[in-house]
Amino acid sequence: MVIFSEFKFENMERIDFKPGTMIYPLPAVMVSCGTSREEYNIITIAWTGTINSSPPMCYISVRPERHSYDIIKKAGAFVINLSTENMARQTDWCGCRSGNKFDKWKEMGLTPIPATKVNAPMIAEAPVCIECRVQDVVELGSHHMFIAQVVNVSVDPKYMDENTGKFDLAGANPLVYNHGAYYKLGQKIGKFGFSVEKKRNKKKRK
Amino acid sequence: MVIFSEFKFENMERIDFKPGTMIYPLPAVMVSCGTSREEYNIITIAWTGTINSSPPMCYISVRPERHSYDIIKKAGAFVINLSTENMARQTDWCGCRSGNKFDKWKEMGLTPIPATKVNAPMIAEAPVCIECRVQDVVELGSHHMFIAQVVNVSVDPKYMDENTGKFDLAGANPLVYNHGAYYKLGQKIGKFGFSVEKKRNKKKRK
């Protein structure tokens, strides 16, 4: 390995990789879909995120050859279920196996419950279930992007913080996907805006 | 707080939130843009992700009133710079302040270097710089989504693992953004596919 200690940072060379998918860390979510128990399926996805705040909108990108693709396209709906470190094995397994061959719910001991607003199941064990209505499908290449409106967010009440009255997502130990591997969420560094917070607000609140 | 220990999980009630942006954990990237030193700017973004594997494509969603919006739209290019836990303060600050009032590079001690393939600066201090060419701008609501092709990925050679010859993104301690706060990346749980790995592959390799 080349030792760079003799260089100043400005002189450090960089390496060009070929174009690739290097945006990380990402969530590893379990997307549930289907309009009947026989059809219900789960697909694990990292190509997901928020694309608009108001109205809340998100996307998932899915390969058309995946078993869930036609199900989601036909139903025009899916649920994004956030995953936790305790669900890492289930998350990984649902990303490696096909609903063509397995009833993933049964195999992984996951419980489908009806979503409130869309025609798709939610995973009862997930801390957060985001109900999505498909608005557009954009054919990009290997993946098609489902652009969706978030129409409801259903959370597990056990993660409500009784002191703040807020939902404590960090307390659910959400699963992190980083460059081909799953990680736990680490130590908190600071809240959004910490770098511009005035000193009087930095005092610890009771 | 209600105690649920007496219920079986299947009977547990859930709470419906109003629709919102709840997909986490996410990256908190610094997007750099501009075609001249005077115009160079940095905007911190969590509404970003991969939307296609082949060809590699990604997006950033930006409010049109942000200083960087017109710069990116005019140049048709931007760079996604992954951030690290050591860059948390710079990342947060660049998300709270406007390039209208500050030269963020100077204020934060960040070094602009020319991107290889696109007309935009990269942040020399970032472990990974993803060069993006804008392909489409989708006006969604509060945010417009820049859909882009990844045309080059430039990495800091100090994160190359000399044993594997691979880039070690976890070793760069990438910053995680989760529900309004920044976190470190935690402990590794397993590689993609660990749940279906055969036992003979589980032995530690030299």
Image (tube, coloured by chain):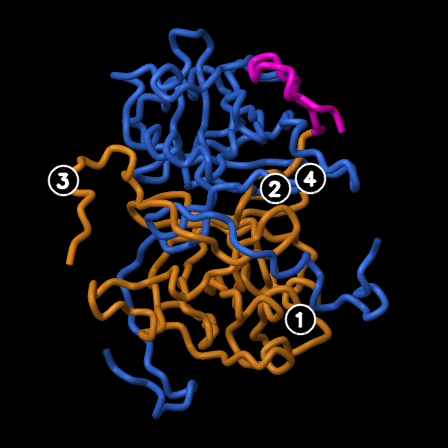
Chain colours: A blue, B orange
Q: Which residue is pictured at 43% across the width and 52% down the height?
A: B187
Kind of residue at disc 4: Ser
Give the residue pinned by disc 4. A54
Residue B99, label in figure? 1
Residue B6 image-quadrant placement:
top right
Q: Is residue B15 left or right of residue B77?
A: right
Check the residue under mark 4 and report the chain it is in.
A
Q: What main secondary structure does the magenta stretch of the protein show? A: loop
Amino acid beneath label 3: Arg
- x, y percent for residue B82: 46, 63
Residue A21: say if magenta.
no
Say whether mark 1 and mark 4 are on the same chain. no
Q: Which one is nearer the viewer's eye here, B203 or B71?
A: B203
Element carrying mark 1: loop
Say whether residue B147 is visible: no
Give the residues in magenta. Answer: B1-18
